[in-house]
Image (tube, rainbow, N blue to C red):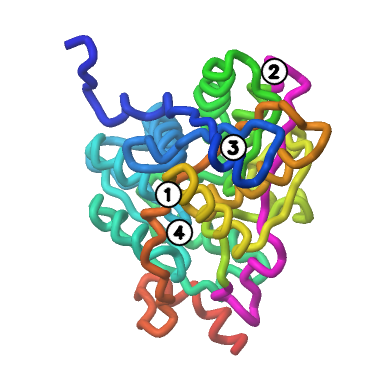
Amino acid sequence: MALLKNSVLDLIGNTPLLELHRYRALHGLSARIVAKLESRNPAGSIKDRTALALIREGERRGRLKPGGLVYDLTSGNTGIGLAAIAAARGYRSKFYTRDCISNDKIALLRHFGAEIVQIPSRVFVEPGARDRIIAFMQEVNPDGYFADQIGNPANPRIHFETTGPEIWNDTDGAVDILVGAVGTGGTISGAGAYLKSRNPGVHVAIVEPAQTSLPTEDNPYVDQIEGVHRVSDIPADLLPGTYDTTVTDEALEVDTAAARAAARDLLRTEGLNVGLSAGSAIWAATQVARRPENAGKLIVAVLADSGERYLCPPIAAATAAPHPEILPLLQPAIAAQ
């Protein structure tokens, strides 16, 4: 009976590490790559950790009461984690997303009872879009709790407290290199900071999308790596508040096709079905593992979620009537056309 858990919250974290022997052999790598399998969290991604931290912070600050509303801007995984924990804690949930994220993620959000408001991707490429969208969300949800995954310090803190220690303990402190994609930057900032606190020599590498994988005004529906953002050449005032640039030692850029190919290699050598952000992390870990100076070193790649969330291609809602709530948000875009 001591093994019984009392809540889904008790199942978050303590995800396994898996050494990728067959993948390493396929690519002839002299370094070892170990995958941190975050899809083993109860709602299916590393963002369960973030969601737990954000909701606990809302409760601590008295912003969340039974029946209250939690909302955020999300590319899917944080929203899914928040929706799952909100359901378990008796809260309502509402999420704002691009209109081109995976249909599987949208379906999951709705299964958890969340309200979804999709915003045309063209709005996100306008100058100052993020701040304008956040201000809009807060205006239309005055009584809700804005989880603020990109600005809430509880995000990187949970990775300093859990993800980093798990990697350190499960490798017996032998980890040499940490590799991960950047969404909010919370994972790499928190886990990376913890690992460096134990061994300052730990090398932290991030992976970010190449320019060809980023939406633009001319092509807002480019084939992109969902939930992974570019940070290395972004002005400091536009970076997520949860991303600590001092933790990162290097940035590698990957295009969507290469991330997809790496995810496919992982599926067919190790039987691991992972998403594109995980594919990008594996691709980056492979580049680092090929360097002669890293022969024999232990590389931990954080794999954020499962490929099951991306089986159905997204169908942009641009052809559908916009959600009535966002019509005021669309006015600048409409006026510019």
The residue range painted magenta reads 196-222
Queried whether the magenta region covers residue 204, the answer comes back as yes
Q: Is residue 41 left or right of residue 297?
A: left
Q: Which mark is residue 301?
A: 3
Work out how far the residue at label 1 is from the one at label 2, CA to CA, in angstroms: 32 Å
- The answer to whether the residue labelled 1 contacts the one labelled 4, judged by CB atoms less than 8 Å apart, is no
Please, what secondary structure does the residue beneath circle 4 have? helix
Whether residue 213 is visible: yes
Question: What is the x, y in percent for residue 140?
Answer: 40, 60
Q: Position of residue 266 (x, y in %)?
A: 51, 48
Of labels 3 and 2, the one closer to you: 3
Q: Would you identify the image quadrant in which residue 39 lies?
A: top left
Q: Secondary structure at mark 2?
A: helix
- Residue contact between numbered discs 2 and 4, judged by CB atoms under 8 Å: no
**Residues at discs 3 and 4 in contact (Cβ within 8 Å):** no
Give the Cα distance between marks 3 and 4: 34 Å
